[in-house]
Image (cartoon, rainbow, N blue to C red):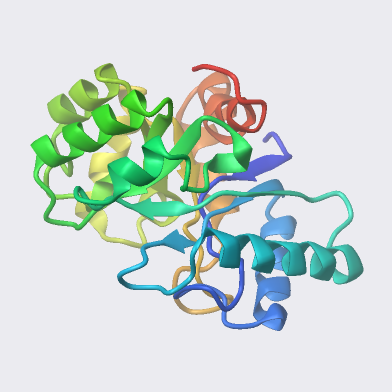
Amino acid sequence: MSKGYFDIHCHYLYGVDDGSKSPEMTLRMLDDAYNQGVRNVILTPHYNPKAFKMGPRDLKERYEEFRELVKREGHPDMKFWLGSEIFYHKGTTPEEMREGHVISMAKSRYILLEFHTNVEFSYIETAVGEAQGAGYIPILAHIERFDALRGNLEKVSLIKDEGALIQVNASTIIGEDGFGIKSFAKKLLKNRLIDFVATDAHRDSKWRTPNLGAAAEYIYKKCSESYADEIFIYNPRMIVKDELP
């Protein structure tokens, strides 16, 4: 199994959303991730002003605090970048993207988008088109949660053809979210429709914990090593290098 995994969707940044609650929790989460082979992390706090009151400046300030924390008490061979999980609001997000007010992934052209679970497919298409029109490459967060895509390989293929990249949560891969959704993930893997697997980790125990190692073990066993390397290493590296897919 390869090491040096990337986790491109996680909530290790403490005190900014419904993720880590404290510096101590963050350090415990990072210890777990490190022990599972993660060496590269794009932090993706929620950007949703209607739900969380942290704007881009606030998130960047907390990220600088985070960097000081991990420099003192973290693992010296772990690398970190700041991104955000952008909740797409049709009325405001397109303007924010056009004006460059969103936090992209590792200062690249890539952005991570999320939606309500009951989002319509046409709404996702609109978001993808708006992101591209603003010069970004959209990654759709945990697509298995969206009614418009869950269980529908044809629509997942279509939205990829329209320029979106696909992220699935590690918990889905290893069956923590139920057998039915794991079965869908297996079909996505078989058809090579997944571009990234990430933890979406929020806590250090019991609920939405760092679990990339188990998902990587499963995919390296069930898929080709080259495809697993794409998911966990090469595609994420493409983000931090700001290279086109």
Residue drawn at point x = 87 percent, y = 71 percent: 73
Classify residue 5 as left or right of residue 94.
Answer: right
Q: Position of residue 191 (x, y in %)?
A: 30, 22
Q: How many marks?
A: 0
Q: Position of residue 98 (x, y in %)?
A: 38, 35
Residue 8 in which image quadrant: top right
Q: Is residue 244 left or right of residue 50?
A: right
Residue in the foreground of this view, choosing between 100 and 7:
100
Image point 25% across, 27% down: which residue?
129
Residue 145: % across, % down: 24, 53
Residue 78 rendering spot, x and y as whole percentages: 79, 51
Q: Residue at x 73, y 73 (%)?
A: 27
Considering only vertical position in the picture, is 89 above or below 15?
above
At a point 46% along the width and 47% down the height, the residue shown is 102
Q: Nearer the viewer, residue 204 or 239?
A: 239
The answer to whether residue 1 is visible is yes
Residue 53 placement, left or right of 186: right
Q: Can residue 141 be seen here?
A: no
Answer above or below: position of 76 versus 194.
Answer: below
